[in-house]
């Protein structure tokens, strides 16, 4: 098997490799991917630093052309890359292709943003003096990504970083190097000069930590666990660098008595279980008011019976496997914790056998849960959700907001009054009415508050807040 190598200073390097395993079929090796060292990472940072002066001054048409070409190739190869994504991460083929399309659209969006760079010109309070306010790139950006969106998250960090003139050292998650390698290969062939984008696959504790410890990394954008996010924050404060964190969620989905039952069930089941519940925007707390509670639980149970859990690449699969054994253990441990805490396992939670050996878990729906149980407070990151019964809208809102996290929040209701109130008062970065808590378009801000996120928003035009720094310049006319 040929090794997919790291890209450092424009050269593909590395012979020490790790096998990438398909979670739908653990006998299937997706490929071998280089494992970078401390030295590799330092070389990548040095290359990005050396490439910065010329890339930061490159013309907007050059950047536009490269990002545009990248978008075109990703979109043209959507089926092939989407299949690779599903094979290495375990989300269904439809989800894999959908995510690949989103990555292409993100590159396309930022290709356009290159052409819309603008500043402001203000009169000074002193006569005959003009003040220019412009945005400049930050420098070397460290991009650290998780396994659950193997192409969309790298795209939404790398595309704006390059668009605004930064150079990049990119460290993807160990479990899903395939899609990352594919987009770096595409970007390089699209014409990126040497050193502008460096790929160092490998361990977080080696590659990631070396990036965090380097004074030559001027900004770090991170998506992953709360624990690692804290490390990123501490190291970044130490180096006085910019940082941006997207971490966990414990997103509520409220169902009110006046909800359309079908809408509520579809949105709740999608939020909680699709993509195997492995989305930071997944809803794991379903907060249901009294009069609709029993009907909702019965209908959700019925709906779950029709959900097909199988090989991600098989036609007809709705939910693929859990990503790996460690995550599967975490999920089943929490199912046991929920039982011990006194919640009732109303549906699922069993390990499933399929034609191929994989990490198959039936979606688990708890009822009779309270908001102080661990299953209601801690992020599980799997197909495990709990229904919490509440009296009315006011209690539902209070319970929804009673969490250390604040990424996404949803409500099912036909009341304009409650929908409007919820949109204004949900303590979350993103709010969905009669829609799943996950599923944010590629051109709008993505991010949260409280324990979920730190720093400015990702995606859309707001991405420039992180990837640029402002300059205020005066001229005496
Ligand atoms: P997850 O549970 O999603 O794997 P992690 O926070 O462990 O969450 O991983 C997210 C990303 O952070 C991965 O690319 C991982 O390799 C990286 N990472 C893990 N440990 C460190 C570290 N000490 N320094 C920098 N990056 C790290």
Image: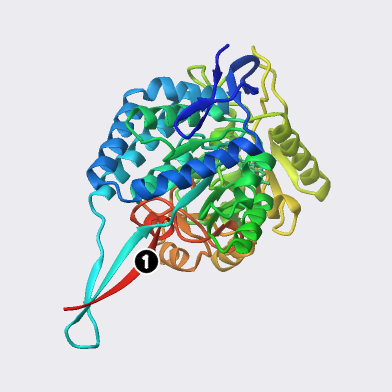
Q: Nearer the viewer, residue 259 or 19?
A: 19
Residue 364, compared with residue 256, is above or below; it is above
Residue pictured at 64% horizontal, 64% vertical: 402
Q: What residue is at 42 percent from the left and 27 percent from the top?
A: 185
Indicate the position of residue 212 as horizontal and vertical percent values: 61, 51
Quadrant location, ligand no. 1 = top right
Q: Nearer the viewer, residue 168 or 90?
A: 168
Residue 90 visible, this angle? no
**Quarter that holds the N terminus:** top right
- For numbered disc 1, what is the local secondary structure? strand
Residue at the farthest right position: 340
Residue 324 located left or right of residue 31? right
The spot of residue 446 in percent (x, y) is 44, 53
Indicate the quadrant where residue 269 lies. Answer: top right
Q: Is 14 in front, or is 337?
A: 14
- For the C terminus, the quadrant is bottom left
Residue 250 percent coordinates (x, y):
62, 53
Give the answer, above or below, for where 67 lies relative to 420. above
Mark 1 Cα within 10 Å, few/some/many (few <14, many 20+)?
few
Residue 53 seen in render: yes
Looking at the rendered structure, the number of numbered marks drawn on it comes to 1
Q: Nearer the viewer, residue 431 or 475?
A: 475
Instruction: State which quadrant residue 28 falls in.
Output: top right
Residue at image location 60% in from the left, 67% down from the top: 398
Rendered position, 218 above or below 23:
below
Residue 276 position, x and y percent, is 59, 34
Respond yes or no on whether mark 1 lies under 8 Å from ligand 1.
Answer: no
Colour pattern: rainbow
Residue designated by label 1: 470
Above or below, comparing residue 44 to residue 247 in the picture: above
């Amino acid at each position: 098997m040929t090794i997919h190598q790291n890209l450092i200073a424009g050269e593909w390097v590395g012979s020490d490799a790790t096998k990438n395993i398909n979670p739908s079929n653990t006998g299937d090796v997706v490929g071998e991917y280089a494992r970078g060292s401390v030295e590799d990472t330092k070389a990548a940072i040095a290359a990005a630093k050396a490439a910065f002066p010329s890339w930061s001054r490159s013309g907007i048409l050059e950047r536009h052309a490269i990002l545009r070409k990248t978008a075109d190739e990703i979109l043209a190869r959507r089926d092939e890359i989407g299949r690779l994504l599903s094979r290495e991460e375990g989300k269904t083929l439809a989800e894999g292709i959908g995510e690949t399309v989103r990555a292409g659209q993100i590159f396309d969006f930022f290709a356009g943003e290159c052409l819309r760079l603008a500043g402001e010109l203000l009169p000074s309070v002193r006569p005959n003096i003009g003040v220019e306010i412009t945005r400049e790139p930050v420098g070397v950006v460290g991009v650290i990504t998780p396994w659950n969106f193997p192409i969309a998250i790298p795209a939404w960090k790398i595309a704006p970083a390059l668009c605004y003139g930064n150079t990049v050292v990119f460290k993807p998650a160990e479990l899903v190097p395939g899609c990352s390698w594919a987009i770096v290969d595409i970007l390089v062939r699209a014409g990126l000069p040497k050193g502008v984008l460096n790929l160092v696959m490998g361990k977080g504790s080696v590659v990631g930590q070396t990036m965090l410890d380097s004074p030559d990394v001027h900004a770090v954008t991170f998506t992953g666990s709360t624990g690692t996010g804290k490390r990123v924050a501490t190291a970044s404060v130490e180096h006085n660098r910019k940082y941006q964190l997207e971490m966990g969620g414990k997103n509520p989905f409220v169902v009110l008595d006046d909800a359309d039952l079908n809408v509520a069930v579809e949105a709740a089941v999608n939020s909680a279980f699709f993509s195997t519940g492995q989305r930071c925007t997944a809803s794991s707390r379903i907060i249901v008011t009294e009069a609709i509670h029993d009907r909702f639980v019965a209908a959700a149970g019925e709906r779950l019976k029709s959900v097909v859990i199988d090989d991600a690449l098989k036609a007809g699969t709705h939910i693929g496997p859990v990503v790996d054994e460690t995550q599967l253990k975490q999920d089943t441990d929490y199912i046991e914790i929920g039982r011990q805490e006194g919640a009732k396992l109303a549906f699922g939670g069993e390990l499933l056998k399929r034609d191929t050996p994989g990490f198959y878990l039936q979606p688990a729906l708890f009822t009779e849960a309270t908001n102080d149980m661990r299953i209601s407070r801690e992020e599980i990151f799997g197909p495990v959700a709990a229904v919490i019964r509440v009296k009315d809208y006011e209690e539902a809102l209070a319970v929804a907001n009673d969490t250390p996290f604040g990424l996404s929040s949803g409500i099912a209701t036909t009341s304009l009054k409650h929908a409007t109130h919820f949109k204004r008062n949900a303590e979350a970065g993103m709010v969905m009415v009669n829609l799943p808590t996950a599923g944010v378009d590629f051109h709008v801000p993505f991010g949260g508050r409280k324990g979920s996120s730190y720093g400015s928003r990702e995606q859309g035009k707001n991405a420039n807040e992180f990837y640029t720094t402002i300059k205020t310049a005066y001229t005496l006319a």
